[in-house]
Image: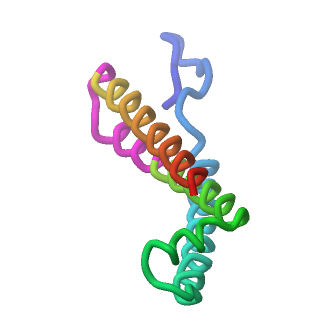
């Protein structure tokens, strides 16, 4: 959306850059695909099934770091999608802003919770 003065002259762009959002969606999706492939491989390579096997997979430092990277990618990927839904379908600005703030809070909380869970292992 471009702001316009009464004279019709553009005062600046206030909307998000569509190309940047599109590119970041593809990058985060690629990270998630890579993580899924690694996770599936690790699951099939587990020596013991059950809780001990999961602890073994996620106790490796590189798997923790890859999981955190994937969780950040998932959070950002979800944020771009949710933000676009709110911007496209919720017209009252106060409701849209409230939903965006709630969404940011929820996604950040989930990310922090994920990090706490991973570093406990």
Measured as percent of width and height from the top left, residue 40 is found at 53, 82
Please state if 90 lies on the left or on the right of 42 as rendered: left
Q: Nearer the viewer, residue 7 or 78?
A: 78
Magenta: predominant secondary structure element? helix
Name above or below for residue 55 compared with residue 2: below
- For the point 61% across and 68% down, the residue is 30
Q: Quadrant of residue 35?
A: bottom right
Q: Quadrant of residue 27?
A: bottom right
- For the point 51% across and 21% down, the residue is 3
Measured as percent of width and height from the top left, residue 34 is found at 62, 73
- For the point 51% across and 51% down, the residue is 117
Name above or below for residue 68 compared with residue 46: above
- Colour convention of the picture: rainbow
Please state if 34 lies on the left or on the right of 52 as rendered: right
Where are the magenta residues, as a range?
79-94
Q: Nearer the viewer, residue 11 or 117?
A: 117
- For the point 56% across and 51% down, the residue is 120
């Amino acid at each position: 959306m471009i702001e316009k003065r009464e004279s019709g002259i553009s005062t600046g762009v206030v909307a998000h850059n569509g190309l940047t959002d599109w590119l970041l969606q593809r990058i985060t999706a690629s990270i998630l695909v890579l993580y899924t492939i690694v996770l599936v491989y690790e699951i099939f390579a587990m020596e013991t099934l059950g809780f001990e096997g999961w602890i073994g997979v996620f106790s490796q430092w590189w798997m923790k770091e890859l999981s955190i990277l994937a969780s950040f990618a998932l959070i950002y990927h979800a944020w771009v999608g949710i933000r676009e839904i709110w911007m496209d379908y919720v017209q009252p600005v106060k409701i849209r802003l409230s939903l965006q703030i709630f969404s940011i809070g929820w996604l950040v909380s989930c990310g922090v919770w994920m990090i706490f869970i991973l570093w406990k292992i």
